Amino acid sequence: MGVRRRSRRLAAMITVAGLAFGAAACGSGSDSAGSGDPNTLEVWTRSNPDPAATYERVFAAFTRKTGIKIDYQPVINFDQQLQSRASTKDLPDVMINDTALMGSYQSQGLLKSIDPASIEGHDQITDKTWASTVGTDGEHYGIPYSRQAQTLMIRTDWLRKLGLRTPTTWAEMLSVAKAFAERDPDGDGRKDTYGMVVPGSAQNGYAAWWGASFLWSGGAKIIEKDGTGYRPAMDSAAAVRTVTWMKDNLFCGDNGVIQPGAISAITGTATNFQDGNAGMYLTGPYNIATYDATPGKDTYEVVPFPAGPAGSTVLADGENVYFGARTGKAKQEQALAAFLISPEGQRLAMTGKNQPVVRIPVNSTLDAAQVRDDPRWSVVQRAYEDASEQFPNAPDFAPIKQDTADALNAVFTYCGSDVGAGLKELNDTLAGDLKDQDLLK
Amino acid sequence: MTATTATTATTATTATTLVPRRRRGPGRKAVLPWLFLAPGLLLALVFKFLPMGKGIWLSFFDVRPFLGDKWVGLDNYTRVLTDHRFQDAVGHTLLLGIGQSLGAIVVGFFLALLLEGQARSLKIIRTAVFLPVVTATAVVGELWRLMYYPTSDGLVNSALGLLGLGPTPFLDNPDTALWATMVMGVWIAAPYNMVIILAGLAGVDRTLYEAAAMDGVSLWQRLRYVTLPAIRPAIGIVLTLAAIRGLRVFTEVYVLTGGGPAGSTEVWMTRAYTLGFTRNDIGGASAASVVLLAVTLLLTVSVNHFRKRGDVR
């Protein structure tokens, strides 16, 4: 009896352990429907249902043209699912995801290297754009698919009502933000409007993503290339000056310059521009389709980011096509990539009633504004071509972005904090991140 | 379902001991319970124990599935346990877990006392009160984020405004964010505890209440000397569940604050999640999870030990 009770107790303990650990442990992978069929490619994109509809249209056209079938999976929690599949060594054949993740994927060995010459139409992508897919070992690990740069969305009806001009400097932007917050631009007699939308949470690195354009335009960098390696650069005078300006004027300044709850907001919850109670939002052009519906196409315009002390350089990013390691379907993958970067494939992905998945085309024969018959896209294209900078793609940037976001979020949260000390600590952390990757110079 | 299976197994085992043939070795009747248990055990093996074993194994490696995992021994544990962000997260987890568990037990107990009875109206109210338990935590988190909206438009702040108190940025102030998260956690868990305690209250001998009333005891004395001792087994179950659930808190925090602001609500599981899926440090995330497993196990065994000691007494 005693033995039985002991064994039951042991079984109960193991069950408890299993329940406790099950959520945290790695999930097992799943075989895709067509993974065994050489004429079917499993393709993953990080997409919500709306952009996924655009991808489906593009892949259907590809299948009609080549006969190669696509098993398409739009995945919202992409990184989590990818790590699960990686643990079973069964990756999707093709993945389309952010450019800044390339270093992370390459460092884990998840990607096949690519010879640009093997992709038909490779010469229609500029050398500058191809350069953004080179890894730490000098090999290409992605095929450019879409690019974009941040621009400022601003309520022109509010500007007109308050007799203000479109801001061209940070000081003017701040004045406009204060006017939007204080002078009742929506005319409802209530103080319920805000100057600017900020996704300032550290979650998923948002504070670094949104803050990067301020850093670049303030003359700061997060890390700098140094010979064959990198060195952290967040303790520079320009970085301290820029972050101090952001803290004093946006987060700890007059109430209403940014929306309430900005310090814990991510892009999914920072909906104030769309809700019609904030007048400016520095963001990517993928929002244009959404904002044309609400607050309405005639209520706002897309303008370049106002200039900081070092110009108006904004964060550029985009998506690459990646080939999963060891899939053995090189010919089909190359055919898909060739279609995706072709004028036909890019046009399809830029148009239609759903959210476009190609923003600025990588194919140099196309013009974004012409394809869409919408001059606002030329503002984005000019920002990308003339005044933008991407997160470095060669190192594993994921920990660098997360640590930067954590530090910026902390500086913006504690208004009495010493910015210089906070950024010095961040710099030491970034040095550790680079050292972990054997890239510290 | 687990309780039913366990009862079936116990009954079957008891029945088996009465049959003389049982002495000659494991007969068909002895195998039968295991046949019934097999599907559940198989599922548990595939979806619980194998991943758990793999997680423990990975915690000793620098995980690079396609480049070959590198054995690093206890390095992941050393790195995780000496990381000040992780240490802070453990502190927040303990505070949140203990506060949330005790809060949910106290609130659940009072809800059970208020809603005990057979009246039809009580059944409706009990169902309404139970809703937070069956609603997806992510949805609850989103609702509470709106309720905590930091201007007077937010539900909580508009209520505070009626009392003449200014709007409070509950989730944006590092001094209040963890407490605000705790209140939501209590709101979610209390009705679950209420149901278990209600079941306990249903078993209390009514004559004890009548005797107590005749003796003229106060309400507090009735609670202290009749109700609480009678529902001790229910409280034991609630405590055991709270010990497990308290440390594994994740969704509430992830949806409500994402661990911020300035890491003030970062907990064990959100830190492990960030390590694993934002920083792609699967080895570190596994080590953090294994430590969590060990502590949860220890806590569960301790709670059970003290519960049983209390029962004997």
Image (cartoon, coloured by chain):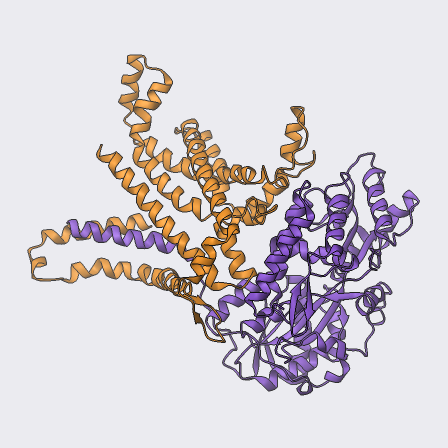
Chain colored purple? A
Q: Is residue B71 placed above or below B96 in the rendered structure? A: below
Q: Residue at x 51, y 78 (%)?
A: A35
Pick whichever, A196 or A239, lies toward us.
A239
Viewed as shown, does residue B227 lie left or right of A185? left
Query: Which x, y percent locates residue B247?
Result: 43, 46
Q: Is residue B226 placed above or below A322 in the rendered structure? A: above
Which quadrant is home to the C terminus of chain B?
top left
Q: Spot the residue most to the right.
A: A163
Query: Which x, y percent locates residue B102?
Result: 43, 35
Name the tint of chain B in the rendering.
orange
- Choose top left, top right, bottom left or bottom right for residue A28: bottom left
Residue A232, can we see it? Answer: yes
Residue B136, can we see it? Answer: no
Viewed as shown, does residue B30 lie left or right of B285? left
Q: Is residue A318 placed above or below A276 in the rendered structure? A: below
Query: Which x, y percent locates residue B233?
Result: 30, 36
